[in-house]
Image: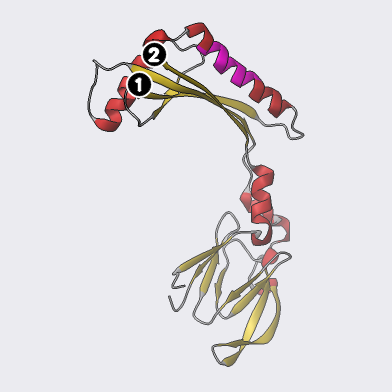
Amino acid sequence: LGLPKVLVPARPGITNALGCVVADLRHDFVNTINQPVALLDEAQLHQVLERHRNEGEELIAKEAVKPATIRVTHSADMQFVGQTHIINVPLPSSSVTRAALQGLFEKAYFARFKVELPEIRANLVNLNTSVTGVRPAIDLSRLIDPVGRAKTLKEARREIRPVWYAGHWHDTLVYIREKLPLDAVIEGPAILEQMDATTVLEPGDRARCDADGNIIIDIGEA
């Protein structure tokens, strides 16, 4: 592929599953309003956004996994009357007023298009809310038990065996991935074996471990 570097995560065979396990819990809500800002009922806006919040928090509370915190963000999809393009405008809270909506939209519109249109009415298209159950951060370096790591590269060796590379046999060092020191530097050819994956270093490749337990490979022929 011509890649100069390759990153091999600590647990390559289960990385997708791990992402599902540690990902934040998020529920998104949207209600279409489609009214000029000047005609909006402020109490109704607050009611819609608070309903979003309550529904999201109730759904997260039913999950078997309990988040560290819950984050709620509100926004409005807005446009000038007669225009087709829509701008998403973040809202500071659910207690939004017509004046605040107008001001936030005009500021966002100018930031994007560098033009002011005070003579055209603003229109609120949608109200949006995201309720996120924030999960604790995971220490990636502990995906491989630090206690099991060897002090030297030699102690992490499993064996030497012949491996076929580019038309020739090479005596190749085989390492136990879980035992590699975090500061290890490995010259190819080498094979790194672990429970969920096997990493092959060809002659000329050079690999090093980082603080998170990843292996960074510099490809020799790239």
Between 150 and 31, the one lying in front of the other is 31
Q: Quadrant of the C terminus?
A: bottom left
Magenta: predominant secondary structure element? helix
**Is residue 23 depicted above or below 88 in this figure?**
below
User: Magenta part of the protein: which range?
Assistant: 45-54
Q: Could you tell me which secondary element the residue under label 2 belongs to?
A: helix
Between 3 and 28, the one lying in front of the other is 28
The image quarter containing residue 97 is top left
- Name the residue that disc number 1 marks: 105
The image quarter containing residue 77 is top left
Q: Could you tell me which secondary element the residue under label 1 belongs to?
A: helix
Could you classify mark 2 by the number of other residues whose Cα lies within 10 Å: few (under 14), some (14-19), or many (20 or more)? many
**Is residue 19 depicted above or below 91 in this figure?**
below
* Mark drawn on residue 55: none
Counting from the top left corner in percent of width and height, residue 189 is at 57, 81
**Is residue 189 depicted above or below 75 in this figure?**
below
Determine contact: label 2, label 1, CB under 8 Å: yes
Between 210 and 45, the one lying in front of the other is 45
Counting from the top left corner in percent of width and height, residue 145 is at 71, 55
The numbered mark, 2 or 1, whose residue comes first in the sequence reads: 2
- Name the residue that disc number 2 marks: 37
Q: Amino acid at mark 1?
A: Phe
Between 119 and 206, the one lying in front of the other is 119
